[in-house]
Amino acid sequence: VQLQASGGGLVQTGGSLRISCAASGRTSSRFVMAWFRQIQGKEREFVAAIMFNGGNTDYARSVKGRFTISRDNARNTGYLQMDSLRPEDTAIYYCAASQTVIHSNWASQNAYAYWGQGTQVTVSS
């Protein structure tokens, strides 16, 4: 599976941005796509995840209620809609995927075998 992320950019505080991650290759019934982010000087952290089969989702506490993860199964593409953006959301966002990760491990980056290139999201104050 190969992942191609797109859609980052510069937005003002309170604005919105949607980033996408297109997956190519065969995906299993347990395919999970996640977004992680790395703020400069900090470790990569979990943002959100979605299981393509069924649409179950999970979010980090810091983005819950502001970010929405979704997927288009026909296009094998996942999306992260980011609303009410804050300067502290500025980071490089990475999409990741796994064919086997169980729900209790969704927030662990070690559980994901496939990674896309990062996309920069910058929120100006």
Image (tube, rainbow, N blue to C red):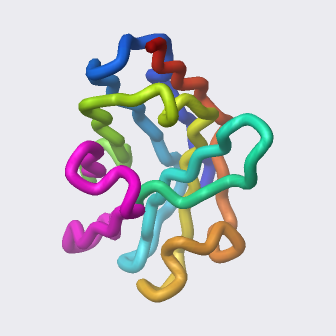
Horizontal placement of 27 versus 51: left or right?
right
Horizontal placement of 29 versus 100: left or right?
left
Give the residues in magenta.
49-70
Q: Is residue 30 visible?
A: yes
Percent of width and height locating residue 41: 79, 40
Q: Is residue 69 magenta?
A: yes
Residue 102 versus residue 6 in the image, above or below: below
Percent of width and height locating residue 30: 40, 79
Percent of width and height locating residue 9: 49, 15
Residue 78 versus residue 28 in the image, above or below: above
Question: Which residue is located at x 52 percent, y 47 percent?
Answer: 24
Residue farthest along the front direction in this orientation: 125
Residue 14 in which image quadrant: top left
Q: Is residue 17 magenta?
A: no
Number of numbered discs visible in the structure rendering? 0
Question: Which residue is located at x 49 percent, y 75 percent?
Answer: 106
Residue 5 in which image quadrant: top right
Percent of width and height locating residue 21: 46, 40
Decide which of 15, 4 is in the foreground and name it: 15
